[in-house]
Amino acid sequence: MLVDRSRAVRYFTVREAARLQGIPDTLVLDGSWSQAMRQLGNAMPVQLAEVAGHWIGECINRQ
């Protein structure tokens, strides 16, 4: 959520939260706002997943 200078609160839309996670706009999240936000909260950012995947692959290939 965002809190502006007047202390007004605005919650992110599902699309805004997905963009903050690096999830492409083409991915559609099903369900209510709270269900979609829960999915995003449990998600790993795309860029981090890419780095982790490369690291795991390197570890596997070393053995």
Image (cartoon, grey):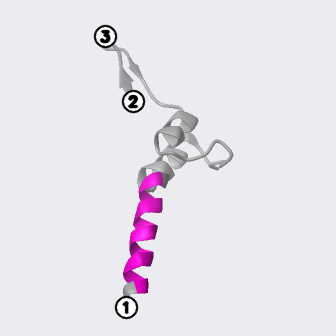
Q: Is residue 31 left or right of residue 37?
A: right
| Res 63 → quadrant | bottom left
Q: Tell me the chief SS of the magenta region.
A: helix
User: Considering only vertical position in the picture, is 29 above or below 57?
Assistant: above
Q: Which residue is mark 1?
A: 63
Marks 3 and 1 sit apart, C-alpha to C-alpha, by: 55 Å
Q: Residues within 10 Å of mark 2 (few under 14, many from 20)?
A: few
Numbered circles on residues, count: 3
Marks 2 and 3 sit apart, C-alpha to C-alpha, by: 13 Å
User: Where in the figure is residue 30, as x and y percent of width and height?
Assistant: 64, 50
Give the secondary structure at mark 2.
loop
Residue at left 55%, top 47%? 23
Please give the label number shown on residue 7: none
- Can residue 45 be seen by looking at this rendering? no
The residue stretch that appears in magenta? 47-61
Give the secondary structure at mark 1.
loop
Please give the label number shown on residue 1: 2
Q: Amino acid at mark 1?
A: Gln
Please give the label number shown on residue 5: 3
- Can residue 17 be seen by looking at this rendering? yes
Residue 51: say if magenta. Answer: yes
Q: Residue furthest bottom?
A: 63
Q: Earlier in the sequence, mark 3 or mark 1?
A: 3
Q: Earlier in the sequence, mark 1 or mark 2?
A: 2
Q: Amino acid at mark 2?
A: Met
Q: Is residue 26 left or right of residue 20?
A: right
User: Where in the figure is residue 1, as x and y percent of width and height?
Assistant: 39, 30
Q: Nearer the viewer, residue 20 or 34?
A: 20
User: Considering only vertical position in the picture, is 21 above or below 9?
Assistant: below
Query: Is the Cβ of the residue at disc 1 closer than 8 Å to that at disc 2?
Result: no
Give the secondary structure at mark 3.
loop
| Res 6 → quadrant | top left
